[in-house]
Image (cartoon, rainbow, N blue to C red):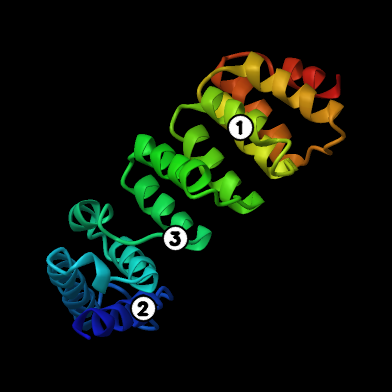
Amino acid sequence: AVVNTLSKTFHSMSSLFAMPDSPPWQKDTIQHAKDREAFVREATVFLTSAHKDELTEDATKSVINACLQYGVHKELAEILVKLPRMTMATYMSVIKAYSALGKVDDVLTVWMEMTRDKKIMPSQVCLGQVLNVLASNGRPTSAQSLLSEWKNVVEPNCVMYTTVIKGYCVAGELEQAIQLFQLMRKRDFTPDAVVFNALLDGCARKQMKVQIGRASCRE
């Protein structure tokens, strides 16, 4: 009962994402934020002592949302392994948590647990989430490999290709970005301004002329 009460409290608190009407620098607003953070921290520590059978997937999502909202990262990292996860929605919350904690390898472990062990079919959004984690953390090659591995199971979309291309550009691997861009065109995906901007930014990062990037895009 205590766990369920805490879960409902977490859910209510984690829904308070909107900025307060009063300026955030006002004393009462700051104090309220500190009080909420302290509660989330203490409650998360309390949940570590709860029996695993007492925890629910709703608790998992509520705890993750509340901890990420109030920056309670240390305690979240300690309890994540214990929190139950059975559905894709909950797995996506866990992936979001590990991503926020900078634990890319743990994201991949959770992905494998979901897809290989639990046989849960990921959605486009779920696959895109993992691709973004890899691409934005300096692993665009791994992201492209994952995209290629799942392309016959989960239908790729323009956003997925764009995510990986941006990852290559940020990593300074412009040649790979252009190759993937060309592959994207061959597969009849229509690139948008985001892709072109990413490629042009990649040119700038490599100290190449913008004209070269534009010519490559036209090809």
Residue bearing the label numbered 2? 11
Q: Which sits earlier in the primary sequence, circle 2 or circle 1?
A: 2
- Amino acid, disc 1: Val
Q: Secondary structure at mark 1?
A: helix
Picture layout, residue 23 above or below residue 153: below
x and y, in percent, of residue 161 in the image: 68, 35
Amino acid, disc 2: His
Left or right of 199 on screen, residue 24: left
Quick one: SS at disc 2? Answer: helix
Eye-nearest disc, 2 or 3: 3
Q: CA distance from mark 2 to mark 3?
A: 19 Å
The residue lying at 61 percent from left, 38 percent from top is 163
- Relative to 25, is 194 on the left or the right? right
Seen in the picture, residue 176 relative to 89 is either above or below; the reply is: above
Quadrant in the picture for residue 38: bottom left
Residue 214 or residue 112, whichever sits in front: 112
The residue to which callout 3 is attached is: 86
Q: Which one is in front, 81 or 100?
A: 81
Q: Which residue is mark 1?
A: 164
In the figure, is residue 195 to the left or right of 44?
A: right
Residue contact between numbered discs 2 and 1, judged by CB atoms under 8 Å:
no
Tag 3 secondary structure? loop
* Residue drawn at 35 percent across, 47 percent down: 98
Viewer-proximal residue among 79 and 215 = 79
Instruction: Indicate whether 17 appears above or below 160.
Output: below
Residue under the point 43% across and 44% down: 113
Kindly indicate the quadrant of the structure image that contains residue 146: top right
> Mark 2, mark 1: which one is toward the viewer?
2
